[in-house]
Amino acid sequence: MNLNQVTLPVSDMDMATQFYRTLGFTQIVDTPHYARFECPQGGATFSLAVESAEFNSGAVIYFEHEALDEWVARLQAKGIEFEQLPTDQRYLWREAILHDPSGNKIKLYWAGENRLNPPWRVERRD
């Protein structure tokens, strides 16, 4: 089993697609109501869908990059604003926090080996 993608709700597709292209993702589907992006590494995708009603997304999308601090500095130079600059977390990840134009929370992070193998890892299956 593999996760295919996550779709985020957006209120303005043009603003949203420009924002994610500025972050460095490649847009591979472009319609007035739906867009999909490919991540630069690993083959993962995510999509955006216009929501006409008011929405409040509680989801957080994470994008990983080994050179996190440099990536954040490049994005700041392009005018991207951050709620939190790269900060070491107690759960052994380094994270920066920002929001897309629709208010979706995004964490740019680097976790290295701790992403899949934290010291508290368990393996439970039924």
Image (spheres, rainbow, N blue to C red):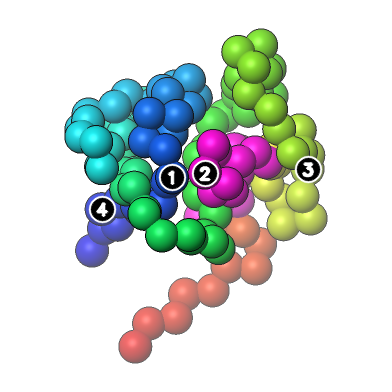
* Depicted 80 relative to depicted 117: above or below: above
Looking at the image, is mark 3 or mark 4 nearer the viewer?
4
Contact, CB < 8 Å: mark 1 with mark 4?
no
Give the amino acid type for the residue marked by disc 2 in the picture.
Answer: Ser
- Specify start and end residues of the magenta stretch as a single range: 97-116
Say which label, 4 or 2, has the lower sequence index: 4
For disc 4, the marked residue is: 4
Give the camera-side residue of 117 and 88.
Answer: 88
SS for tag 3?
strand
Q: Closer to the observer: label 1 or label 3?
A: 1
Specify which label sits upstream in the sequence, 3 or 4: 4
Q: Which quadrant does the N terminus fall into? A: bottom left
Residue under label 1: 11
Question: Which residue does the numbered mark 3 point to in the structure image?
Answer: 88
Q: Position of residue 34 (x, y in %)?
A: 25, 42
> Where's residue 21, x and y in %?
41, 23
Image height of 31 relative to 61, above or below: above
> Mark 4 belongs to which amino acid?
Asn
- Amino acid found under the numbered disc labelled 1: Ser
Q: Are marks 1 and 2 in contact (CB under 8 Å)?
A: yes
User: In the structure shown, which secondary structural element does the residue marked by tag 4 occupy?
Assistant: loop
Q: Report how far apart the C-alphas of labels 1 and 4 lie in the structure.
A: 23 Å
Q: Position of residue 102 (x, y in %)?
A: 52, 44
Residue for point 38% across, 82% down: 125
